[in-house]
Image (cartoon, rainbow, N blue to C red):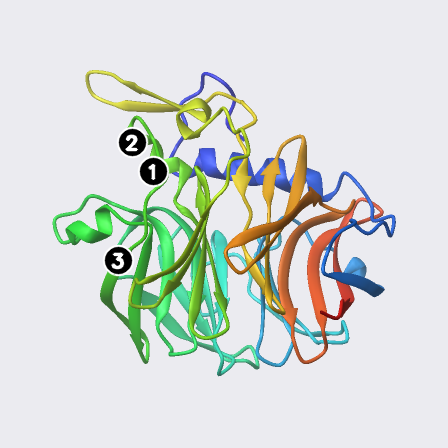
Amino acid sequence: MPLPGVACRQRSVAWHRFLIVAALVVASDPVGAQPKGLPWRIDSTAVFGLGLNLGLVSACDLGPDGSVFVLDYSNVALLRISPDGRLMWKRGKQGRGRGEFIRPTRLAVAANGEILVYDAATAELSSFSGDGEFQGLIALPLLFHQLDDIVILPSGLVAISGIVRELTNAPTDALRSSIHIFRKQALALDYVRSFGPLPDVHDPAVLRYWGSGFLSSAPNSVLLFARKLPYEVFRFLENGTVVDRITLDDSIATGPDDFIHVTREATTTRFTNSQKDVPVPARLISVGDYDLGGLIRATGRSLDVFHDHDRLISTTMPPGWIMPIGFDRRRSVLWILGAKDKHPALFREHLVFARH
């Protein structure tokens, strides 16, 4: 974890932010309290994963059959958990061989069950079948200073949010946008287009370590995007058309420039972490007819529910929750990454929706 006044290597500031979040994961336990005003109630809760010895979880996603996929950064492993909470398989170890990782940070699951895992050390995607069989490596057509999220859309297109590196072959739109669309063909990606606003910064260099925002897929081929300040929620079509944009005034007085300081010297540029508590919007997920998001701070987390063109409710995230993973519509189950007895765990929350 970078210390104040110490120059940070690429991505180290962003990982410091994640380590703050991870500390919150193991700091509190669920007490069964339910926020008031939500359009659903939690009918039952089951806790799984305590026997898996999970470490720092860098990403989770929900598969088409309701399975939960967990990327364990500390143990360099990809796990598949069945809808009823059983470990189906575990893959990966430290290394550069087939199905191995160095720094696995992001994952996405396709409708056909294929899993893509991004390794920040190699800037490549590893492809696995739904059964956990390694299928090969995929090179990215663009290189990223900071890759925030990956989503595989129902059409098969791959959407990546992040800050593209300033290389001669990088399209101008890619350098100016947060979201980048690729067409996948076997073990290759072809660049299609970029869109979506970048976070507001005074110094563009800050974006290399701050990132752009988080993505998820919603019904009707809609792409949800939570911008990393100002606090805005977008709904895009895969061609970049804006379906909806919700700008939220949460009296956020700080921004990316307050968290990351850039010092330019004769032969180098130094990035330092100010340690200020700058909020980061959480990844949005679609829950029934609603979208669930919020803000993550070192001092706590908020839970926001969006419906139609507005925010329906803003409240404190239940104790023990840290990151919504996804909603299993068929079973009406919301999966949450959280903590139980100070250990990372998976919560399976069965939801009952209020009748209109």
- Residue at the image position 43 percent from the left and 68 percent from the top: 222
Q: CA distance from mark 3 to mark 1?
A: 17 Å
Q: Which mark is residue 127?
A: none
- Mark yes or no: residue 124 visible: yes
What residue sits right under mark 1 in the picture? 208
Q: Are marks 3 and 2 in contact (CB under 8 Å)?
A: no
Q: CA distance from mark 3 to mark 2?
A: 19 Å
Counting from the top left corner in percent of width and height, residue 27 is at: 76, 38
Q: CA distance from mark 1 to mark 2?
A: 6 Å
Identify the image quadrant of the C terminus: bottom right
Q: Nearer the viewer, mark 3 or mark 1?
A: 3
Is 304 rendered above or below residue 19? below
- Residue at the image position 62 percent from the left and 60 percent from the top: 325
What residue sits right under mark 2 in the picture? 205
- Please name the amino acid that badge 2 sits on: Ala
Q: In the image as oriented, which residue stretches furthest toward the front? A: 356
Counting from the top left corner in percent of width and height, residue 178 is at: 33, 50
Q: Which mark is residue 194?
A: 3
Left-right relation of 308 to 165: right
Q: Nearer the viewer, residue 246 or 164?
A: 246
- Residue at the image position 67 percent from the left and 80 percent from the top: 330
